[in-house]
Image: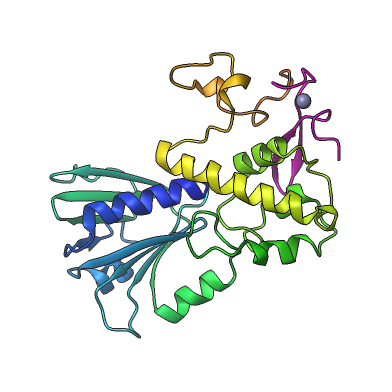
């Protein structure tokens, strides 16, 4: 599933392509036709992201449905380009065209047009998003520090933190030398402060690069040049490979419905 950095990057791209332009919004597949009709022909004003949710606002009076709300889920994907849009192929949920650009959306779990109140109802349920300037890490801390649930599970809960997925969960815990099995209430305020700072930096880098790289140069097989896929992570998808720090074999087990990866020697407690 795309993590928050992908959604923020997409929001930035859509904004630079479309903000200020009147868009032709359609649903070649038909499933989103009623929603598309609500914003078709209107100017797109702003695009923002909160966790894994993307909102594109259109120039319509307050009170009317005017936010295109998208959640990609596991399989959703955007394709974008300049000039004329390509011929329609397959199940195309939504197409945006205007300002000399196009964007196609396939396979999202949510694609709808909602009101200001409905948008607020979505974001109210989300924890702070490390990539948002208005993010308040104390909101996440309140939930983490009161919970007997493991941090590995809490980090995947979008009500605790918005935008973190399976890769950032595993990598953040490794970098902080925190066991994924430690209960939230056993974290210290210092643990959380440094985890938040690290997470913000990692995710910002993810937005810029369009990929997640969490390793430090000294921990990579190749220390200079473009970071290879194999060198990008400490533990994520490295089951059975030696830990980059201590040589212990990286482990995996299912936690919160997804494979968790960790080093049992570096992340003891
Ligand atoms: Zn290790």
Residue toward you, 204 or 22: 204
Q: Is residue 257 magenta?
A: yes
The residue at the point 48 percent across, 16 percent down is 224
Residue toward you, 49 or 199: 199
Where is residue 40 drawn, in percent x and y? 21, 68
Above or below for 247 versus 83: above
Instruction: Kindly give the residue lying farthest to the bottom in the view shown.
Output: 63
The residue at the point 24 percent across, 65 percent down is 44
Above or below for 144 versus 120: above
Magenta part of the chain: 244-269
Residue toward you, 73 or 12: 12
Colour basis: rainbow
Ligand 1 lies in quarter: top right
Tell me the quadrant of the picture where the C terminus can be found: top right
Tell me the quadrant of the picture where the N terminus can be found: top right
Where is residue 9 drawn, in percent x and y? 39, 47
């Amino acid at each position: 599933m795309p993590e928050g950095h992908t959604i923020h990057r997409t929001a930035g791209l859509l904004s630079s392509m479309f903000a200020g332009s009147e868009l032709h919004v359609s649903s070649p597949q038909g499933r989103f036709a009623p929603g598309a009709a609500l914003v078709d022909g209107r100017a797109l004003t702003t695009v923002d992201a909160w966790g894994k949710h993307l909102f594109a606002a259109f120039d319509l009076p307050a009170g009317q449905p005017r936010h295109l709300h998208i959640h990609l889920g596991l399989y959703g994907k955007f394709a974008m380009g300049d000039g004329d849009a390509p011929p329609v192929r397959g199940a195309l949920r939504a197409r945006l065209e205007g300002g000399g650009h196009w964007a196609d959306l396939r396979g999202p779990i949510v694609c709808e047009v909602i009101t200001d109140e409905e948008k607020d109802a979505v974001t109210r349920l989300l924890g702070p998003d490390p990539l948002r300037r208005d993010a308040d890490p104390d909101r996440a801390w309140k939930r983490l520090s009161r919970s007997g649930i493991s941090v590995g599970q809490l980090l995947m809960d979008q009500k605790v933190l918005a935008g973190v997925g399976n890769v950032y969960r595993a990598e953040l815990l490794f970098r902080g030398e925190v066991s994924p099995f430690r209960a939230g209430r056993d974290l210290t305020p210092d643990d959380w402060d440094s985890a938040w700072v690290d997470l913000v930096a990692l995710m910002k880098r993810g937005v810029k690069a369009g990929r997640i790289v969490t390793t430090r140069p000294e921990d990579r097989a190749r220390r200079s040049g473009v970071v290879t896929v194999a060198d990008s992570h400490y533990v994520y998808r490295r089951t059975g490979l030696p830990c980059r720090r201590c040589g212990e074999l990286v482990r995996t087990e299912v936690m919160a419905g997804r494979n968790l990866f960790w080093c049992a020697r570096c992340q003891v407690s």
